[in-house]
Image (spheres, coloured by chain):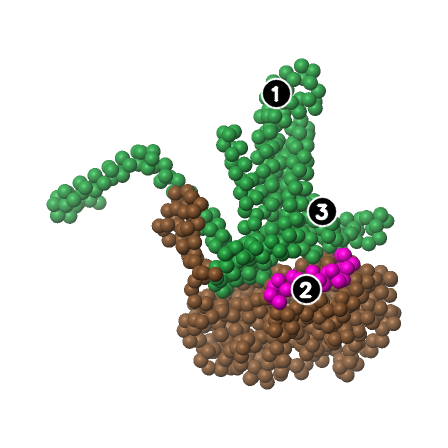
Amino acid sequence: MSRSGPPHAAASLPAVRPRAGFLQRVQQQLDRESTLGPLLMLPGALLLVVFLAYPFFLGIWLSMTDTTLGRPGNFVGLQNFANLMTDSIFQQTARNTFIYSTVTVPFKLLLGLALAVVLNNQMPFRNFIRAGVLMPWIVPTALSSLGWFMIFDPVFSPFSWLLKSWGLITKNINFLGDPNLAITSIMVANIWRGTPFFAVAILAALQTVPAELLEAAAIDGAGAWQRFRNVTLPAIMGIVLITTLLSIIWTFADFQLVYVLTKGGPANMTHIFGTYAYNVGLWATAIGQGAAIALTMFPILAILAILLLRYLRTEV
Amino acid sequence: MGKVSRRQFLSRAALALGATPILLATACQAPPAAPPPAATKAPEAPAATKAPEKPTVAATAPAPAAQPTAAPAQIKGTSLAILEGTYFVAAGQDLFKKMAQDWGQQNGVTVSTDFLNWPDLQPKIGAAVQAGGIDIVELWPGWCFLYRDQLVDLTDFANGVAQKGGGFAQFVLNSSLDNGKYYALPIGNSGTSMNYRISWFKEAGADIPDPAVQAKEGKWPDWTWDQFFAFGKKLKAQGRPIGQALGHSTGDPQSFAYPYMWSNGAMETEKDGKTIAFNKPEFVDAMKKFIQAWKDCYDETGTSWDDNNNNRAFMSQQICATLNGSSIYIASKKSAPDVAADMNHTLMPKGPSGRFYQFSTRTLGILKKSKNIEGAKEFLKWFADDKQYGEWFRIQEGYQVANTQKWATDPVWTKDPKISVYTQNPKYGRDQGYAGQIGEKSSLAWSKYIVVDTFAKATQSGDAKAAIEWGAEELKRIYGG
């Protein structure tokens, strides 16, 4: 089919010229890095605004109101934060979160480091084992938490059953009901889940350590520990720091594991910021107070994030 | 405090923080990227003062329950989303789901039914209140007060249901009426009673008449807490402890803790809703007894039990008694007939101040955010009809006490004498927040597990006084007394 223009096509030609000029100007603009750069960044920036900046500022706003779900609130300034300072459950929650993070992260780091060193050696089925080690990290936390929930079951725990059948204990272990044992049990599950992240990240770093350096050190008479201490460790220190900082941030802001296992009980002995904020904000519908609880995490996480970014910047 | 709009706040915050150009541009020039949730419109007039957008059927005339074919044609082609908590009596859930689907097919409405794990129900309702997407929600005690501004007024409709059923049961009037209005349709009360093993308690010295005689004469074992603990002590010594959840789960811990508190002279607040009446000497004494009983009578792992543990423990014959609905009995009849044959239910033990239960009134509400309010009303009208409601109520075999008087003498209560005691719950019922008004503050106290955790702390520390003082202080923070 031939394309024939309308009878007035010739008359309209002059009108096309400005359009062509416009496109040319657009093209010229796009050729400039100062225009194209921000333009290409725009979709990402919009995503950040919609999904990060807006909720973040909304959260700040809510934390300064007495809003409840379904009812608009009034501006109350810093009252919600002031109330938290005298809230014994919040104080317990802060203690729990601090213990939860400071105990689990070193364990995850050391176990992950040891695992990575082992996996870095030649062994049968090495790739298969490496993939298997990653499983706790890959499995959705809600799902693996349910597995731990069954292991820690107060009545039907396989551990209790086994130990009772061996005659080592006479009654079930109260994994999640005893205040000290409850937080310990949750930390064990967290360490199990988080160790593979360290292991895999450090393993990747270990593989970048130049073999020549290690050989040279060995020729100079350095033992295995000295080679690790003076050659390997400095080479992987960057990755170790980054994974540690990331892990602190994630552990600090954890939610799923505690929510599935104890929901903060017994008597708030396992509440962490995430679960307490959820409890107050969504269960009790006091969304303003819940936002305030969640935001108390922000300064600590922000400092960690700044440290991480500064380190990355200096390294890159 | 003065009111500052969200947009003003965002603009000032972004400017003050010296945010990135993008944030500045967004906060100062562009409208918010996503529509703000209703709850954040702080400066606007409270929704409570706004009338519903258009007159509703229920609001214009007392509406007797409709027949299945009575739904108007205009709802054809619409959709309806219903959200409820998981049923512990599976047959009840299956029936409700089937009923909803059948009604949808008859009326050309696409109906979806979701049944959530109990702890997830309230947050999901909260999300729906903010963002919509659900039409009918199941509300637990207090929630119809909590969300009253976001619920369609169903007063006329509910009164029509009551009229047809010979009047609402007293528990409905005590727990769902909000200044003369119903913001949700009361559908029942999921009752609790003491589930116990007949032969084991007889061995421990309890006088237990035949279940049929108990039901016929209305005389169930009428134990005090002291008597109950005495039986429990003997039974735990035989490896058959009492099972009671004291963890952070949503049903069983509260069902025990509130009634034990009330039966021993303590309350959250006085009638003014402010003066804390929790730290009473008689309650401290009762808590001391409970601490001892926890060691002597109970399975001490109960501090981590959820609402399922006692069901499983009872059915696997590991505990002699537990507070629960009729769901253990119903499940046992199918999967553990020996247990079902040797178990019965009796009244909650009583204390010096009497016997009490915590109301577990269930209501179905329609969210104002619903895009199908008419369809939701039509469904509720259909569901409230005797044929549907009766079938739903009966299949749960005592798990729900019905909403109106006419069902109090229904054959379901005499068909199996072992569930007859569930008819007694409501007359001993009290709401959260008693003696004050149920609402936001009582819900906050309930959600923070203040009363439950007082018991958990007491059993952990062995210090009744300190635990109750902690609870009283926390309640004071909430109620402002």
Image marks 1 and 2: residues in contact by CB distance under 8 Å = no
Front disc: 2 or 3:
2
Going 63% across and 41% down the picture, which residue do you hit? A194
| Chain assignment, label 3 | A
Residue A188 vs residue B135: left or right?
right
Alpha-carbon span between mark 1 and mark 2: 66 Å
Mark count:
3
Residue B356 versus residue A17 in the image, above or below: below
Residue A180 vs residue B32: left or right?
right
Numbered tag placed on residue A211 in the rendering? 1
User: Residue B450 at x, y = what percent?
Assistant: 66, 62
Residue A248 picture quarter = top right
Residue B172 vs residue A25: left or right?
right
**Residue position for label 2:** B472
**Region rendered in magenta:** B458-481
Q: What element carries label 3?
A: helix
Q: Could one spot residue B101 in this view of the protein?
A: no
Question: Is B20 inside the magenta-drawn segment?
Answer: no
Amino acid at pointer 1: Ala
User: Residue A156 at x, y = what percent?
Assistant: 75, 54
